[in-house]
Amino acid sequence: MKYKFLLPILFLGFILRVAYLDKFPIGLYSDEAVFGYNAYLLLQTGHDEYNRFWPVGLESFGDWKPPMQAWLAMPFVWIMGLNEYAVRLPSAILGTATIVIIYFIAIELLKFSEHSEDSEGRNVRFSDSQKVRFSGSQSFLSFPIIAAFLLAINPWHIFMSRMAMLVAIEVFFISLGVLGLIRGLNDTVIPAQAGIYLNRFRVKNGMINWWWVISAVSFDGAIYSYYGSRVTVPLILLAFAVTQFNELKSKWKEVIIPFITGLVVLSPILIQSITDPVILTGRARTTSVFFNDNVRLQLWDAHTKAGLKKIPPVISRFLDNKPYYYAKDILSRYWSHFSPVFLFFKGDSHPPFKIPRLGYLYLIDLPFFLIGLWLIRRKAEKGQRAKFLILYLLLSPFVAGLTFLTPAANRSFNLVIPWTLITAFGLFISIKETPWRTPRSLLIMAVTILYLSSLVFYSYSYIKLIPQELPHYWHYGRKELVNKLKPLLAEYDKIYLTNKGGPPYIFLSFYLPVQPDDFYKSIKRNPIINELGWGHTDKILNLGIPREFDWKEVPKDPQALYIGFENEIPEGEVQILDRVYYPNGKVAYVIAKL
């Protein structure tokens, strides 16, 4: 069997991504609930929560989201019902499929050149070095197999594939698009004998580069999946065009149909963005470094100090100017995503992407990544396709560097694919170039133990430490709260519900679930959008949701029910009816009446 060594790796990756998907992550994050409930509404009515007919952008809390996650969840919600498993399953499945994609990308990367160099500078044909055989065994290791295995157990990829947070499906589409680009460059397109002509380009029927059509559609899929792709995709295409320019010159006619296909698939976004630009840009304005005050404060400080030193304002503003300070700020934020502290030790400090005591990559990756990067860099001096791989690596966190919440695990997630490929290549060469069979076997055993031990520790942190230390990051308790509220909804005409712990209206809508007619009739949106672009829902069903749940300001009604977050309600002033607890025993929510 050609893929007999890939199948067990694929099975391992699948289990790591789908097992107990409804229980881990520990809670359903608000963005996941948005995609799930909008999928439910689209199935029932063809409209989203704002009653828009099949939109290409979901408004949710005021921070517009691309619709792909909701679209992909629809068949699973239809079959399995509205629950955590159905909402997260598309990410898990496409995350598993990405393992297959990286396997085939690695095969294509073996064709970057007919020759490579070993550690002593000797020329070795890739075709001859693709497999490493061991005496007494019929198994083999190869660069594609190692790449698939490393992605299957990669903690960053497992983490993101187990949540419905856009980026896992984005990386699937981006990596499939990259595979299509490279594969299409290697393919020879043979025109059909009987052809038709398209305009003056004289493209015959049958001259379609189907890999490039797949690539175009895949990149469109990424753009429908995550706002960052609207910058990342053009950059990847530009990098590919620049590095492969000589080969593309002879295949320019084959670009026409993929280009037209890509425009057609993107046309709904392009058309709607004319009347509503926010559909195209999302939260880019409120998350960018240009919206944040960091640079402006630095400039004010620099100009103030220059004034105290009697430096003329003209000179001060020439030396301390916006372009320089913004460039420095963006570059600093960009490079933070390559920091060992971020990658291996602390990770992202912003919810819900924190993994206690861990970064997003195994430390054992580092030496093999450096070896692989060194070898590929040497090959890039002569091979244009190796340059594309390095540019793929460098471009992946570019979008994240343009935001002020850095380093960001979600916005830089594309980094996981080129990182894994380069690491796998370094590990493959390290094993291959080990001079004797016994040391080679010891190296394989040691590396395997280290990787599996790292996976065990990651699993412990994910399953045990997140529920104990960070349950609030995942809006834990909303499901439990809704279950306790169900029998009380008919007993109270007025219920005052806290806004903390995640936007409550979406959890009520998801877990009850609220039927479409009841949702559209009872939902009351606050017209005021705050400075960060967040909206607020004042009411749903018979539940009032103050923007700020201040016990001193909340109306006191003996007939009403009150739900507070953690210690918002002073227990000495009310009658406690019930509580919701975090897994660590602390109080998450209090249900009370006067």
Image: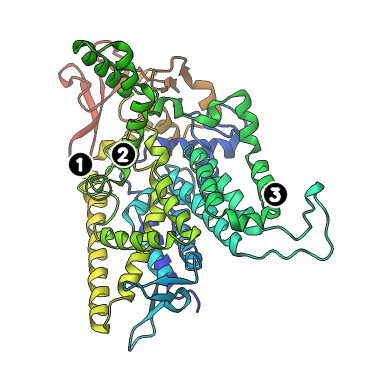
Residue with the most extreme left position? 572
- Image location (x, y in percent) of residue 458: 25, 55
- Residue 473 placement: quadrant: top left
In the rendered view, tell whether residue 368 sits above or below residue 262.
Answer: below
Of residues 553 and 311, the one nearer the viewer is 311
Number of disc labels: 3
Of residues 587 and 394, the one nearer the viewer is 394
- Residue 71 placement: quadrant: top right
Q: CA distance from mark 3 to mark 1?
A: 53 Å
At label 2, the amino acid type is Pro
Residue named by callout 3: 256
- Image location (x, y in percent) of residue 286: 41, 25
Q: Secondary structure at mark 2?
A: loop
Look at 41% across and 27% down and name the residue there. 505
Mark sitting on residue 407: 2
Q: Secondary structure at mark 3?
A: helix
Residue named by callout 1: 469
Mark sitting on residue 159: none
Question: Is residue 476 visible to us here?
Answer: no
Of residues 8 and 332, the one nearer the viewer is 332
- Colour mapping: rainbow
Residue with the most extreme bottom position? 136
Look at 35% across and 86% down and name the residue there. 137
- Image location (x, y in percent) of residue 404: 34, 30
